[in-house]
Image (cartoon, rainbow, N blue to C red):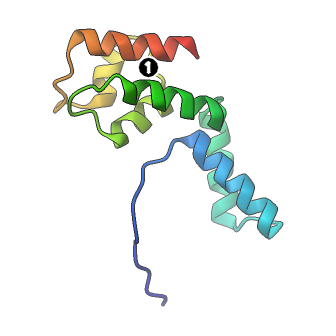
Amino acid sequence: MANYQIINETPVTFAELKDSLKKIEARDTALSFRGTKTKDYAGLTTELKAKDVKDIKKKVEDLNVMRLKEKQIAKIINVLPKDTDSLKVVLGSESTTSKEDLKKILDILKEH
């Protein structure tokens, strides 16, 4: 069995994952079974394009919300919550984000 080592870990959105898998598929001419299944799932779960995701991610990061992690931003973009309660669920129980910051995040999401 192969020994794998994780070099770095970066949260990605489904749109970014789908884009990466398209590049791999073009390079290798075909994806593995798991790659194909992952691409299918990513395609079903998001309608955003990688370009839109980068725009949303940058705008949310520019808000400088205290304690908002990259992992949480990826979850927000994957789920695209429509209201404050849904956004609170996505952020988790440990989030102490203010109502004003939640509203700003939702405004950014509504643009897309």
Q: Secondary structure at mark 1?
A: loop
Which residue lies at the image location 41% right of the left edge and 13% below the top edge? 106
Rendered view: 86 above or below 27: above
Q: Which class describes the residues within 10 Å of circle 1: few (<14), some (14-19), or many (20+)?
A: some
Query: In the rendered image, which residue does mark 1 sit on?
Result: 81
Q: Position of residue 12 (x, y in %)?
A: 49, 47
Rendered view: 17 above or below 78: below
Q: Is residue 11 left or right of residue 68?
A: right
Q: 64 and 48: which one is in front?
A: 64
Q: Is residue 2 left or right of residue 92?
A: right
Q: Is residue 19 left or right of residue 96?
A: right
* Image quadrant containing the C terminus: top right
Which residue lies at the image location 39% right of the left edge and 34% below the top edge? 73
Which kind of residue does numbered mark 1 sit on?
A: Pro
Q: Is residue 78 left or right of residue 33?
A: left
Outermost residue toward the right? 29
Q: Position of residue 26 (x, y in %)?
A: 81, 60
Q: Quadrant of residue 66?
A: top left
Q: Position of residue 3 (x, y in %)?
A: 43, 86
Which residue lies at the image location 27% right of the left edge and 33% below the top edge? 68
Q: Quadrant of residue 50?
A: top right
Which residue lies at the image location 39% right of the left edge and 65% below the top edge? 8
